[in-house]
Amino acid sequence: MTHTPEVMLWIRFENQPNALKYRAKPEDSDIADLAYRLIVENKRLKDAAPDNIQILLNDQLQRPDTRLVDIETTATAPLIIRYPLSEKTVIIRCFFQQFLLFEHQFQHSTGIWDQLCALVRENENQLEEIDKSKIFFCTTGKKHGGQELTNIFELNHFLSRLPADDHEVGASLSVRIKGRKSYSEWKFYDITKTIFGKGFDDLGGFPCFDPDEIPKPTSEICTETVNGFFVEIRRKLKAFRAIDNELVTREFISPFLTTAVECVQKNEPSLLLRAEKPLVGSRGYGPVDFSVERDGVIILVTVVKKEQFGQGAAQNLAQLHSMVETLEKKRKLDHTDFEDDDSLPVIAYGIVTSAREWMFLLWAGDSSKPTVQHTPQLPCPFDGDLSRAKAILEKIVRILDSQNIGLNDSSRRMKIKKCRID
């Protein structure tokens, strides 16, 4: 007669706080037998079918034919019993930064939260390294929008209130990250307190810089390029007549950026202009209106309404902070450059613009102790011979060219004096 060894397992029903010691029956040899036995013995599983029970160990789903004698469990690493909570199928549309990440059909089980978080990280590269404990959701839509869901219990309570259509419920959720804000949610006082340890109401206490003091570009903007720029601006002025909303504002900003990038691409073909590229950092996340890249971002552009330059500066500062963090993680920055007692290398520039006004920000140093400078709001009225539009274009070209030279040779990276903000 064959002796079946006694198997003692630690098990925990998913989302319950404590693991239990469980003595397997001699006739139960594998995971499939265990699932059936648990249904028979536990009231919470009385309506479940064996094929609706999932058993996991260290986040890995166990095969039905896995032998119990081959499984090692402890109180801190038990078998997790995942089971249905209802007969409903849940269809979730999940958004991040206003973009649809996925639409997925879930069984309404104890595992829906973990499965949802796993799909978020799988479908958004920027969130791969985010611990799942940092992820939560916010409901969207006119009827059910605005509710924060921070755990499985709040999610289940929300789902239980939704009307079911033939055992199906649908929900739209937006991904949020604990401890971080969307860039557009930052206020100037809050972001400066986060970055500098002291909050400021505006840029008034920050030092100014003059983009015209940046060395002239290695290649001057040719007359043909300038004339093409003028033609494009005048075509838009004729077509739109007024800059009265964000979409039109972007139409007028675009010629400045495309022309400047094209100019510098003659010396550096890999330079690239992007629109609405997502950016994630330790303090913020969201899309960047425009960015110019070459082996890392070198300019970030924030589009604002005329009366929102303060808010735009806050958003741009938060994005610059995230961008520098990204460079640090990728080891793109040489921290020996930050050891000088008097000066810091310029890492990146930001632009805040309503098309009719432009403000430039300069970020020098690392993410922890930077020096930030700015220009006044520079008018660009699009009148007469467009000379002020040309002046703005020339400033952008100077910045791009200077950044490109610094990337080629760090010793030629522009430096500024360290400055403590009071």
Image: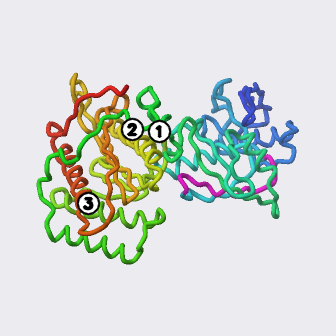
Disc 1 versus disc 2: nearer the observer: 2
Relative to 306, residue 185 above or below: above
Three-letter amino acid code of the residue under disc 2: Leu
Lower position in the chain sequence, tag 1 or tag 3: 1
Task: Please name the predominant secondary structure of the magenta segment in the image.
Answer: strand
Image disc number at residue 388: 3
Q: How is the image coloured?
A: rainbow
Three-letter amino acid code of the residue under disc 3: Arg
Image disc number at residue 362: none
Quadrant location of residue 368? top left
| Residue 314, x across and y down, in percent | 45, 42
Q: Which residue shows up at 18% across the image and 38% down it?
A: 410
| Residue 7, x across and y down, in percent | 72, 28
**Contact flag, marks 1 and 2 (Cβ < 8 Å):** yes
**Contact flag, marks 3 and 2 (Cβ < 8 Å):** no
Q: Which residue shows up at 23% across the image and 24% down it?
A: 339
Image disc number at residue 188: 1
Q: Is residue 118 visible?
A: yes
Range of residues picked out in magenta: 85-98
Give left or right: position of 395 versus 41.
left
Q: Which residue is mark 2?
A: 203
Lower position in the chain sequence, tag 3 or tag 2: 2
Within-10-Å neighbours for mark 3: few <14, some 14–19, many 20+: some
Q: Which residue shows up at 61% across the image and 54% down it?
A: 94
| Residue 331, x across and y down, in percent | 30, 36
Residue 333 in the magenta stretch? The answer is: no
